[in-house]
Image: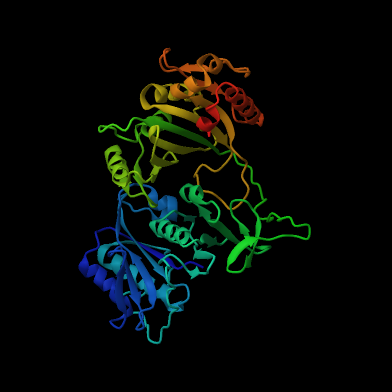
Amino acid sequence: MTKDVIALTERMPDTVSMLAGLLSGGPDLQVRTLGDGAVVQLCNAEGRPLVSIEAPMLLQVPGEAARLLGPDAEPASGTAWWIEARAATSVPQAEELAGAFAARLTMMLGGTIWPPDVPGTTDPAHPVDTSGITAVPAPAAAQPAVDMLTPRTAIVLQDRPVVPMTSWLSEALRAALESDRGLQIVTPGHCRISPALRAVLDAPTRWVVQDERCGYYDGTSGAVLRWEDGAFVPDRDESGETPVAESFADLRPTDDRRLIVSFRTVHAPEADLVLGGALETVWRKLTGAPPAGWSTAEPVNVPWSRRQLTALAYERAPRPTWTVVVGHPDRPAFATLRVIRTPKGVEEDVTLTLGYGPGEEVPLAELPALADELVTRHGLASLVCQLREAGRDLSVPPRLELPPVPVGFALGAEEVREVGKAHASRTPLREAPVRLGPASRPGYYYGLGDGEGPEGWEAMKTLMHYLRSGGEDFAATAG
């Protein structure tokens, strides 16, 4: 399957160590760069790529290596240089070459290699025998992460404990969509994906899971797939229906819970606006600490900084800015944050997910006060809180999980004005709404239950129908 090799070095790679790594295949291999030097490729004599190496990344956020690669990969110091090499899957010796590259780096700089049993690491002092190596030419418009390119789709093969939304995959997704292709990520059945990658999985992008019983199925829907005309597509039975893979339907009860808090804020586009305040407020309220780090891809490598986040969003405006945010290792928490300019101002769309194990209390009682602070200080437009029976570690398995159940909903002051203050302050629900913010421009929080049964969905449906009847613009506001 995949032939990714990651070196986690204790010291910063310098020119000498990188050169020593690049010479792991001997002096006959060619070296070229892509993306203004962001990627270095080792190529055979014909210039065909064997190993693609991403620029070193300083991993400054504790817990990221363990989150994505497993606890054994976490550096003792909490920080490390992450150097990722991707071997061409069509060349048997390429994985050994990537392993030798990583082994030479860690031999000179200290550190560890993932996976630890990758070929090429036993004798890093001697070059890999690359004589007679041939490789498939890289197709036009292919990215280093792409294993196969067809007229319909770009195929990426992965085999990691957790498949993240790396910069490799982000670039492959962008290139695929720009060329009117889908991106399909193929993994074995034991792999999970990160919540960041799950957030971007939308047709024509698909997670394809290999399965002994049915061949292939969609990791998010369970639909059995078949290969047809250069892409994985849903299979059909005699009645025209798409069957669901048995492996996907293997529902496994758990005592773990996830609290999902999704909200949207709107700010006036002022020169002194600093973004991320609403997310930090919610994070502190629910975990007792601010976020640990943020980035535009995984692994998350930059310590949390609202000013750096704002600078990036201003630099990219008016284009949207999408980022991922993580918490400290002792409290699993993960968020996606999207900043976009709209006619209403600068909007922040946030989805924050927190994991809780058996015996850990989910802080549902904090939600009304949290919503009040968002209305009062951060321009809340709307908020939805849900509770889900799912794993504490927040990764997404390729099997069925129970859907989240709504436990709370809130409207900001402007949205209450559009619905009508008198209408918004009364609902058909058993629990009266909680007024948020100042009496002159209030918002409201609506409790929907404890999340332990289907009643939350019925309450949400009733509330949405009632609120929409109060204002013509509410349907667009609530999304």
Q: Position of residue 93 (x, y in %)?
A: 43, 78
Q: Is residue 235 left or right of residue 64?
A: right
Q: Position of residue 445 (x, y in %)?
A: 51, 22
Q: Is residue 206 above or below residue 354?
A: below
Q: Residue at x 52, y 27 (%)?
A: 473
Q: Position of residue 293 (x, y in %)?
A: 34, 43
Q: Residue at x 30, y 37 (%)?
A: 306
User: Which residue is most to the right?
Assistant: 239
Quarter of the image for residue 454 reads top right
Q: Is residue 121 visible?
A: no
Q: Residue at x 62, y 26 (%)?
A: 465
Q: Residue at x 25, y 33 (%)?
A: 271
Could you say which is closer to the camera, residue 151 or residue 76? Answer: 151
Q: Position of residue 453 (x, y in %)?
A: 65, 31
Q: Is residue 241 visible?
A: yes
Q: Is residue 173 above or below residue 449?
A: below
Could you say which is closer to the camera, residue 80 or residue 172? Answer: 172
What is the image's colouring? Answer: rainbow
Could you say which is closer to the camera, residue 253 or residue 45? Answer: 45
> Count the marks: how many?
0
Q: Is residue 67 left or right of residue 468?
A: left
Q: Is residue 316 above or below residue 217?
A: above
Could you say which is closer to the camera, residue 67 or residue 132? Answer: 132
Q: Is residue 41 left or right of residue 364?
A: left
